[in-house]
Amino acid sequence: MDLKTAEAIVLDVIDLHDYDRIVTLLTRWQGKKRGVAKGSRRKYSRFAGQLQPLAKVRVTWMEKERQELVRLSSVELLRAAHQLDKDLEGLLLSAYLRDHMLEFAQEDEPGDHLYRLLDSTIEALVAGADRDLATRYFEAWVLRLAGVFPPPTHCPECDRPLPSRGAVLPALAEGLVCRDCGGRGAETVAPEVIEFLLRISQENLAKMAAKPPPSGILEQVDKLCAEVRRRFLQHELRSYTVIRETLEGLRGQEPATTDERE
């Protein structure tokens, strides 16, 4: 039996039996880990208050060969993420970030880049970063790290530069090409969206926040990333569907303007 310790971010917590929980963690060097927190549902559990969604923790676990679930022996809270749980938008965003890692991170495989991306995004959001910008930055980088959405510098078909010519997303494809190579049914991608995708290669989130793209461009980035992600996964993230349906529902409840009432 091996005893291991690592920093981790809590992705998911599921009740197990009467007193236990199954916890999914994202670690830097072991990727996703799933373990049992024995007695964590008891009132005076040593895990009390530690297993929060997106919390950064130092966790120690015992691992047996050929055993699917490890056994958590201790969890120390390093950074909470309560600020994201204070409103509906924050709760939905928390689920959306976690869903990405549950889908894209691999179990028992090093995931340093994904871990650092999630860690820095949470830290920025907790510090008050613009949620829309942080989310677009995060989802574009997840796709890039997964190898399905490389920096759009040149058309992969003809090798001509993309920014000056704009770009398109061909039907059923996962990457961008120039307009000449797009073919029938290709979706147009604005040069400003290309600029955003290039900027994330050169600037961290804080630097981008100093000169953020207009909300309309961020909305286009959102739609593009969602389409590429759907094609790659062959399904949509459940949290993304919930977010869109919830936001549309809230818009439908907004009071009419004076012009609309007239």
Image (cartoon, rainbow, N blue to C red):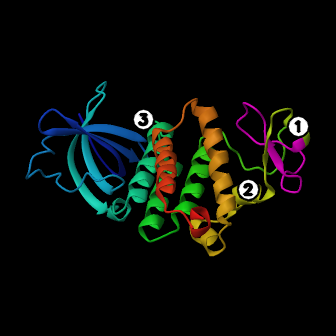
Name the residue located 11 percent from the left edge and 50 percent from the top edge.
45
**Position of residue 100 in the picture relative to residue 260 (left or right):** left
Q: Is residue 121 above or below residue 184?
A: below
Observer-side mark, 1 or 3, equals 1
In x, y percent, where is residue 127? Answer: 43, 71
> Which residue is outermost to the front?
262
Q: Name the residue under label 1.
A: 181
Q: Name the residue under label 2.
A: 193
Q: Give the range drawn in magenta.
A: 158-179
In x, y percent, where is residue 77? Answer: 27, 59
Q: Mark 3 points at which residue?
A: 107
Which of disc 1 and disc 2 is earlier in sequence?
1
Visible residue check, residue 116:
no
Observer-side mark, 3 or 2, equals 2
Q: In which quarter of the image is the N terminus?
A: top left
Q: What element carries label 3?
A: loop
Q: What residue type is labelled 1?
A: Cys
Q: What residue type is labelled 2?
A: Val
In x, y percent, where is residue 151? Answer: 73, 50
> Which residue is outermost to the bottom?
210
Q: In this view, does 24 lie above or below 193?
A: above
Q: What element carries label 1?
A: helix
Residue 81, disc? none
**Position of residue 93 in the picture relative to residue 16 (left or right):** right
User: Badge 3: few (under 14), some or many (20 or more) residues near its Cα, within 10 Å?
Assistant: some
Does residue 114 belong to the magenta stretch?
Answer: no
Q: Quadrant of the C terminus?
A: bottom right
Name the residue located 32 percent from the left edge and 37 percent from the top edge.
34
Q: Which amino acid does label 3 sit on?
A: Glu
Of the pair 50 and 242, the residue shown nearer to us: 242
Q: Report how many numbered discs are placed on residues in the image.
A: 3
**On the image, which quarter does residue 181 sit in?**
top right
